Image (cartoon, helix red, strand yellow):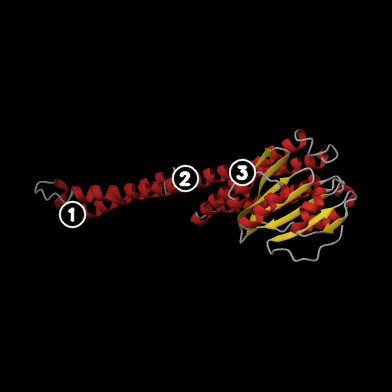
Amino acid sequence: MNDASAPLPDCVINCAAYDRQGVRHDITLDQISDALSVDDGSFVWVGMYEPGAGLLEKLQEEFGLHDLAIEDAQHAHQRPKIEAYGDSLFVVMHTAQVIDSHITFGETYAFLGRRYLVTVRHGASLSYAPVRARVEREPELLALGPSYGLYAILDFIADHYLPIATEFAVELHRLEQDVFAEAYRRQTIIKLYELKRELTQLRLAVAPMQDILSQLIRVHSELVPKEVRPYFRDVLDHALRVNESTDTMREMLTAAMSVNLSLVTIAQGEIVKKLAGWAALLAAPTLITSWYGMNFHNMPELYGRYSYFVLIGVMVVVCAVLYRYLRKVHWL
């Protein structure tokens, strides 16, 4: 098979055929049908980024893809899933990247047939060119067929989930220190909420991937040979680790938010106690002075020589006793 020299559309990142030895041969989109017409153990791998409707229709014609799968790939915003259409599989996966300390999600659609693999990327997604370059350095594994290429992509996606989970674990540890700080900071609870929201979104991307991988391991033996299944089991293990990590962090975030709320409530209670203590302390002299503000002529203490000073002394003693008691019970 001769290497193709015709330029590919900008949205087509790679278009190549791999022979039975796993050696790459670049081809054009029009040469796909020629490459597939000869059943010589080769397969075609096409990688695209946000292709238009016309190009997807071209690929549908070349590979015989199902209308519903093409419709999903064209409109994007699908949930992670795996669908069987005749002798081919349609796999939807969510990719994730951390941009400006926030997770941005993209989508990857894969069409897997006995002799082809087509990947379509949408949104925030790293290029799969490094994946292709890595597997091309192992032609004996690439010779296992297009399912090995699908494994490499799934492994690449799962491997990028784990650093995100690790980074968020560090952020959670830092926020836990802020939760137990002396001063209440509203920004702390905002960051805790944002982190929990993003971890929930990450879990929605990772959890369905377990079902996808389980099916690739246990079902579809005509498309996934037994030699490739151990590789999918390894990716499943990675996905399980990320899923468990996100679940643990979500629970810890819930606990941190509850603790933060409890600490704020306790702090407010302490403030109310102190205010109530000072109010009680001021209530005693207020009561005494208001008693002597009633202006009755026959109140016996009014005409005593030292009544004013005695009254001052009584107020001081009462306030001192109250202050000592309130300090003892930690209300002041």
Q: Nearer the viewer, mark 1 or mark 2?
A: 2
- Answer whether residue 251 is visible to the viewer in this image: yes
Q: Which of the image's four quarters has the N terminus?
A: bottom right
Q: Secondary structure at mark 2?
A: helix
The quarter of the picture where residue 30 lies is: bottom right
Label 1 to label 2, Cα distance in Å? 50 Å
Q: Nearer the viewer, mark 3 or mark 1?
A: 3
The quarter of the picture where residue 218 lies is: top right
Q: Nearer the viewer, mark 2 or mark 3?
A: 3
Report the side of 253 relative to 128 (left or right). left
Q: Secondary structure at mark 1?
A: loop
- At horizontal 21% and vertical 54% (from top left) the residue drawn is 308
Mark drawn on residue 284: none
Report the side of 294 relative to 264 (left or right). left
Q: Which is nearer the eye, 252 or 141?
A: 141
Q: Secondary structure at mark 3?
A: helix
Q: Which residue is mark 3?
A: 68
Q: Which residue is mark 2?
A: 266
Answer with mark 1 or mark 2, whichever residue precedes in sequence. Answer: 2
Answer with mark 3 or mark 1, whichever residue precedes in sequence. Answer: 3
Label 2 to label 3, Cα distance in Å? 57 Å
Mark drawn on residue 305: 1
| Crowd band around label 3 with a 10 angstrom C-alpha radius: few (<14), some (14–19), many (20+) | few
Residue 80 lies, in percent from the top left, at 64, 44
Amino acid type of the residue that numbered disc 1 sits on in the rendered structure: Arg
- At horizontal 77% and vertical 52% (from top left) the residue drawn is 33
Residue 70 lies, in percent from the top left, at 63, 48
Q: Which is nearer the eye, 286 or 313?
A: 286
- At horizontal 27% and vertical 50% (from top left) the residue drawn is 285
